[in-house]
Amino acid sequence: MTASREGGKIGLEKIQDATVMTLMDNKKNHPAIIIIFYSIWSLWVIMSLSGCTSGKATLLWNEIPDATSYNVYVSRSPGVTKLSGSKISNASNPFAISELEPGKTYYFVVTVLNEQGESEESKELSYTAVANKTGLIYFKDLFDKSIQDNKSRNTEKGTVTIAWPKVPDTISYNIYWNDSPWLTILNGKKISNAKSPHTIKGLKRGTTYYFVVTAVNAFEESQVSEEISFTAD
């Protein structure tokens, strides 16, 4: 926008005629000049602020088998962790991030979620934002191969088979199990009408599980049996 002066009148382009006529008073042109140039200054400030552009970046990584979702953690300081970074949940792959301040460096890590929970942080990558540009942050493999192989092994499922002798007059058996000791019928996961032997699948490798059995007759359920434990491998 520009200011113009014709016939002793001050005008501002793209201002409504009524406003211009109010300001274009030849007898009071000096206050009008102050007002108009004040308006020009305001418009210049607004235009300058609107012209401040931010940087953008796209994060990309190789897919992890069995991953259900990903979280991105970002920080302005290196050494990003799940505790220190700003969390972006359920991030897609690729993931676009905007509103990055030009000239500032940002640090990123990614975590993987599956039915076992959330992984540890990936390797860290950084990016210095540039105005009006979209940078590419390509992790390739989120983890070193040795770590990834170990994660793959840990996500494999273990199984255990439980057997017990028959109890006279018993109608059925219940199994109670959990990954914490001191099992009761209140804190254990119940498997009703179990038969001996009984196989439980889907156990996380490296985790110790605890089991008890109860016998059910026509009148009641017995006390829990002696507790046994098993570490899935």
Image (tube, rainbow, N blue to C red):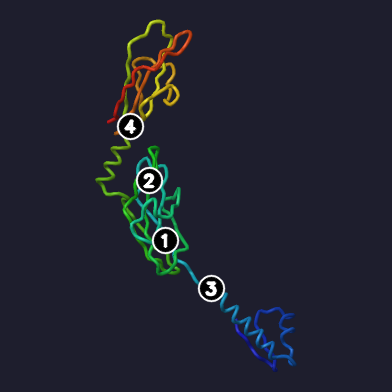
Q: Amino acid at mark 3?
A: Leu
Q: Amino acid at mark 2?
A: Val
Q: Residue drawn at (61%, 82%), measured in percent from left and top?
A: 40
- Mark 1 or 2: the one toward you: 2
N-terminal-most mark, 3 or 2: 3
Within 10 Å of disc 4 (Cα), the crowding (few <14, some 14-19, many 20+) is some
Residue 211: image quadrant is top left
Helix, strand or loop for disc 4: strand
N-terminal-most mark, 2 or 4: 2
N-terminal-most mark, 1 or 3: 3
Q: CA distance from mark 1 to mark 3?
A: 22 Å
Within 10 Å of disc 3 (Cα), the crowding (few <14, some 14-19, many 20+) is few
- Mark 1 or 3: the one toward you: 3
Q: Residue drawn at (30%, 37%), measured in percent from left and top?
A: 154
Q: CA distance from mark 1 to mark 4?
A: 37 Å
What's the mark number on residue 49? Answer: 3
Q: Quadrant of the C terminus?
A: top left
Return the x and y of residue 70 as percentages of the image width and height.
41, 47
What's the mark number on residue 57? Answer: 1
Q: Which residue is mark 2?
A: 112
Residue 100: image quadrant is bottom left
Q: CA distance from mark 4 to mark 3?
A: 56 Å
Helix, strand or loop for disc 1: strand
N-terminal-most mark, 1 or 4: 1
Residue furthest out toward the front: 182
Helix, strand or loop for disc 3: helix
Within 10 Å of disc 2 (Cα), the crowding (few <14, some 14-19, many 20+) is many
